[in-house]
Image (cartoon, grey):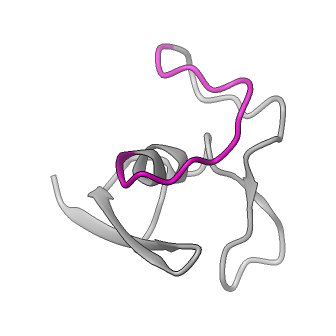
Amino acid sequence: MAQIKIIVNGKECFGEAGKTILAIAAENGIEIPNLCYNGKLKLYGACGLCLVEAENSPKLMRACATVAQD
């Protein structure tokens, strides 16, 4: 799979395209608090604890349910 880069709190994080923001952050040693995320269940984003801000987005995004983009 293709590699993408995201920046979390000023740190460059690399991961596979198609993974969520939460998954890529975790793989790069960054913890995003969450309650409802379970890698074995369908992405749902029910609790909203993992909300993150993204450049050029007017709304906050659920890191557990948002596929990361370069």
User: What percent of the width, then of the height, locates residue 27?
Assistant: 36, 47
Q: Is 12 placed above or below 1 here?
A: below
Q: Which of the 4 image quadrants contains residue 6?
A: bottom left
Residue 7 vs residue 3: left or right?
Answer: right
In the figure, residue 58 lies in which quadrant?
A: bottom right
Rendered residue at 84%/31% (across/down): 47
Seen at 83% across and 40% down, the residue is: 48
Residue plotted at (69% across, 85% down): 56
Q: Which of 43 and 7 is in front in this view?
A: 7
List the single residue furthest toward the bottom.
56
Residue in the picture at 73% in, 46% down:
50
61 lies above or below 37: below
Depth check: give the residue in front, 27 or 37: 27
Instruction: State whether the magenta stretch is mostly helix, strand or loop.
Output: loop
Q: In this view, does 45 lie to the left or right of 14?
A: right
Q: Is residue 6 left or right of residue 4?
A: right
Q: What stretch is highlighted in magenta?
A: 27-40
Q: Residue 9 falls in which quadrant of the image? A: bottom right
The count of marks equals 0
Q: How far across and how far down the image is residue 68, in percent? A: 47, 59
Residue 20 in the image, given as x and y percentages of width and height: 48, 47
